[in-house]
Amino acid sequence: MTQLTNLKDYILANYPEYNKGFANVSKPDGTEIVIDENMNYAGIADNLGNYFYIRSLKEKSYKPFSRGCRVLSYEVTTKCRLVSIFHQKQDEAHLQNIINAISYMGHVVDKSDGERTKVFFDETGTRNMNDNLKNLSLLSIDFTVTELVSAKNCKPPICEC
């Protein structure tokens, strides 16, 4: 999603405490591993500095906009998550900065979670953190991306729009 890449770029440009960010990462079905578009590991680790990743939660909803019986467009909302991995203790100001960045880019924050073991479990499927990971500060923020998508009203088999 272009919106996730734009959000990543905005955060990296405006929040120098992050040295790296990943957008459009995914957790392939049946796994608990977070990978980037090049199939490289992008999940929670202690060797990447202060970084974050953003992924779609693959939950979309559609609201049609119509004139008469014709649907002209849809408002598509996609649930997404930003996970921040920090070597220093995060505080309320840091959370507010991320919420501000998400909001500035036109998205709506739904919830946040700063409880390290819960965020780790939600992202990895395990509660077994090694000693290096126990010193990390983890923050998870769920948000909604909304976009307007036009509908093509076609008559099969020949499209007459």
Image (cartoon, rainbow, N blue to C red):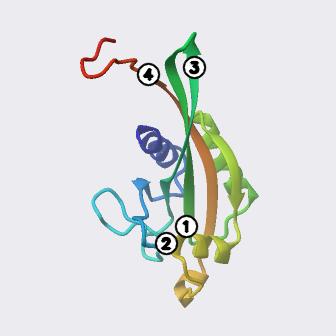
Residue at (70, 63) in percent of width and height: 113
Q: Nearer the viewer, mark 4 or mark 2?
A: 4
The image position of residue 120, as x and y in percent, is: 59, 74
Residues under labels 3 and 2: Cα distance? Answer: 40 Å
Q: Name which quarter of the figure residue 140 lies in.
A: bottom right
Tag nearer the camera, 1 or 2: 2
The percent position of residue 93, horizontal first and vertical second, equals 72, 54
Answer left or right for 112 relative to 75: right
Marks 3, 2: nearer the viewer: 3
Q: Which residue corresponds to mark 3?
A: 65
Q: Nearer the viewer, residue 50 or 84?
A: 84
In the rendering, which numbered label is found on residue 85?
1
Asked whether the residues under the numbered discs 3 and 4 touch, taking CB atoms below 8 Å apart as contact, a structural biologist would say: no
Which amino acid, mark 4?
A: Ala
Query: Residue 135: which quarter of the image?
Result: bottom right
Q: Note whether 81 is above or below 153 in the view shown.
A: below
Q: Secondary structure at mark 3?
A: strand
Cα gap from disc 1 to disc 4, whole angstroms: 39 Å
Q: Answer above or below: position of 68 versus 50.
A: above
Numbered tag placed on residue 151 in the rendering:
4
Residue shown at the point (47%, 49%) measured from the top left = 12
Q: CA distance from mark 4 to mark 2?
A: 39 Å
Mark toward the viewer: 1 or 4:
4
* CB atoms of marks 1 and 2 within 8 Å: yes
**Of tags 1 and 3, which is closer to the observer?**
3
- Closer to the chain start, of discs 1 and 4, is 1
For this view, does 34 lie left or right of residue 37?
Answer: right
